[in-house]
Amino acid sequence: MSEIEHPLPHASWETRGYWEGAGRGEIVLQRCPDCDLVQHKPRGVCATCLGSHLEHFVASGRGTVYTYTITNQNQAKGFADACPYVMAYVELDEGPRLLTNIVGCDPDAVEIGMAVVADFATQERDDGELFAVPRFTPA
Ligand SMILES: [Zn+2]
């Protein structure tokens, strides 16, 4: 079993703050000052009130496993050698749920409600950008 080799993220104007934050080891979320919604995925407008004054902030990096599955077979490049691995929705302490992986423990040790903390898989790139893919480990 090895680590997942994630495809390189593509940073659009909406997602650049998120990927750059991950490259610094931070979970960056958006907050709407008009209605207080904290949202993920990054968007150009608030998903609730359509306000356009969104602010980026660094989240705690803490959350709990909302749900998960253990993937035992995946033939896709970058994933096949990582089986079995855990795909999970982590509910961040700030509210949004993030589709991610749970690493750093036996897949059978993962439970719904388990406290987790962000960890980052930094990627080698040839374009000078420093991005990373957030994943989580037991807290
Ligand atoms: Zn709003």
Image (cartoon, helix red, strand yellow):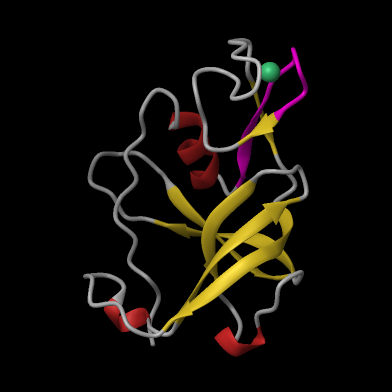
Front-most of residues 124 and 51: 51
- Residue range (magenta): 26-37
Residue, x 40% and y 75% (percent of image)?
3
Quadrant of picture, ligand 1: top right
* x and y percentages locating residue 64 in the rendered image: 73, 62
Q: Quadrant location of residue 95?
A: top right
Residue, x 70% and y 78% (percent of image)?
111
> Could you tell whether 12 is left or right of 41 in the image?
left
- For the N terminus, the quadrant is bottom left
Front-most of residues 111 and 48: 48
* x and y percentages locating residue 124 in the rendered image: 32, 55
> Could you tell whether 19 is left or right of 113 in the image?
left
Q: Residue furthest front?
A: 48
* 29 inside magenta stretch: yes
> Could you tell whether 63 is left or right of 56 in the image?
right
Judged by its main secondary structure, the magenta piece is loop
Front-most of residues 29 and 22: 29
* x and y percentages locating residue 65 in the rendered image: 68, 65
Please determine whether, in this image, residue 4 is positioned above or below residue 60: below
Q: Quadrant location of residue 106?
A: bottom right
> Could you tell whether 110 is left or right of 74 in the image?
right
